[in-house]
Image (cartoon, rainbow, N blue to C red):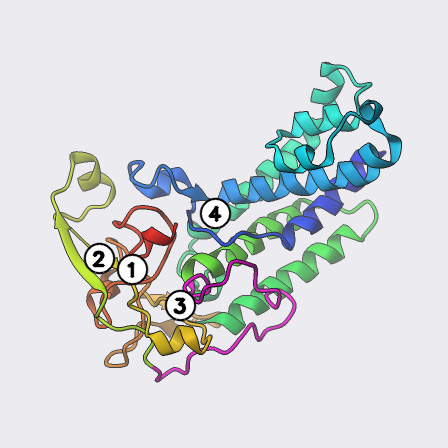
């Protein structure tokens, strides 16, 4: 049946899709809808999944079978926003609404599982503070290696006949989270890139990385801000007053111009072998930055993350 094969093919396709954008893990993690307009990890995953399904249906059903009597305009088809049910209706115009709902349901369950395990990377104690799971602390080689290993497991499981793919779907969500964080936590966007880094998930080395003792940020370009807390912020953030930074051009110009990769540090992070990874003192490394990130107050102050469009959580919110 077409559905069985397409589900697993789509899982593989979504591994390779990402967007240069900023996002928060889930709306609830944005603490009180302060970043409610930011695109989330789960939303990016859903967009990628549906675009993959659209491509699959067009190439396997709509174009070769001349579905809908040739009335599907290719440009409109690929630029319009679709739901999964929309795409099924175009691919299978002979289906009733009940059939669309029936045949699309397993794919929706698959997507829900992938999105859930994507979001859990920020909540699971094993990965919440694991720098390579988020490309934090300049762990670029480790982060790409994590994606490579997860991808290998997904592909291996998907190629085994009659295999239970629950684990493969979970790992797809996990690797997509790490892939998405590369763009939001590194200086890839600040370098002027508008396309994806094609080395991620294929090579452990994804570019030139700043040396451990090499300064990457300065205090210049960051403005410290303080504001009172609402009752909801007192409950969710548990810090009052709120101290955060608005940063622009705080990454050293030579770092970006020489295309040297850097990402923000935090306190109490760990490496892939459990070793502690903290922001080094007296070096001038960038912080991740956030009202929740105490390392943002240690020179170089501020931060560079683009996780949300709120300065409370993202010093580079302007790039959202």
Q: Decide which of tag 1 and tag 3 comes sooner along the chain.
A: 3
Front tag of 1 and 2: 2
Report, in whole angstroms, how far the alpha carbon at label 3 lies from the one at label 4.
Answer: 21 Å
Q: Secondary structure at mark 1?
A: loop
Label located before the other in sequence (1 or 2): 2
Q: Which residue is mark 4?
A: 120
Q: Do callouts 2 and 3 mark residues in contact (Cβ within 8 Å)?
A: no
Q: Which residues are magenta?
A: 186-214
Q: Residues within 10 Å of mark 2 (few under 14, many from 20)?
A: many
Query: Quadrant location of the N terminus?
Result: top right
Q: Of marks 3 and 4, which one's residue comes earlier in the chain?
A: 4
- The answer to whether 39 is drawn above or below residue 87 in the figure is below
Name the residue carrying label 2.
245
> Which residue was labeled with disc 1?
289
Q: CA distance from mark 1 to mark 3?
A: 11 Å
Single out the residue that lies furthest toward the right: 65
Does the image show residue 146? yes
Please tell me how crowded label 4 is: few (under 14), some (14-19), or many (20+) other residues with Cα within 10 Å.
some
């Amino acid at each position: 049946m077409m559905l069985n094969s397409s589900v697993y093919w789509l899982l593989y396709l979504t591994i390779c899709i990402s967007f240069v954008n900023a996002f928060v893990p889930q709306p609830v993690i944005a603490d009180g809808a302060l970043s409610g307009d930011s695109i989330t990890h789960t939303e990016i995953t859903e967009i990628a999944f549906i675009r993959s399904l659209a491509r699959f249906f067009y190439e396997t059903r709509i174009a070769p079978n001349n579905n809908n009597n040739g009335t599907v305009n290719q440009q409109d088809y690929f630029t319009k926003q679709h739901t999964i049910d929309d795409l099924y209706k175009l691919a299978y115009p002979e289906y009733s609404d009940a059939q669309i709902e029936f045949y699309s349901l397993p794919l929706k369950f698959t997507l829900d599982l992938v999105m859930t395990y994507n979001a859990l990377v920020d909540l699971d104690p094993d990965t919440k503070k694991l720098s390579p799971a988020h490309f934090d602390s300049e762990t670029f080689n480790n982060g790409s290696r994590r994606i490579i290993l997860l991808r290998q497991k997904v592909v291996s499981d998907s190629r085994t006949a009659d295999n239970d793919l629950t684990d493969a779907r979970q790992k797809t969500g996990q690797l997509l989270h790490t892939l998405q964080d590369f763009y939001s936590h590194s200086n890839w966007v600040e370098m002027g890139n508008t396309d994806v880094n094609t080395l991620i998930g294929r090579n452990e080395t994804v570019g030139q990385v700043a040396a451990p003792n090499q300064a990457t940020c300065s205090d210049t370009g960051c403005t410290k801000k303080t504001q009172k807390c609402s009752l909801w912020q007192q409950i969710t953030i548990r810090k009052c007053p709120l101290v955060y930074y608005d940063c622009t051009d705080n990454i050293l110009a030579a770092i970006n111009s020489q295309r040297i990769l850097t990402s923000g540090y935090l306190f109490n992070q760990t490496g892939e072998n459990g070793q502690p990874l903290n922001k080094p003192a007296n070096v001038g490394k960038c912080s991740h930055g956030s009202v929740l990130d105490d390392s943002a107050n240690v020179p170089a102050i501020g931060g560079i993350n683009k996780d949300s469009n709120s300065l409370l959580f993202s010093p580079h919110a302007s790039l959202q």
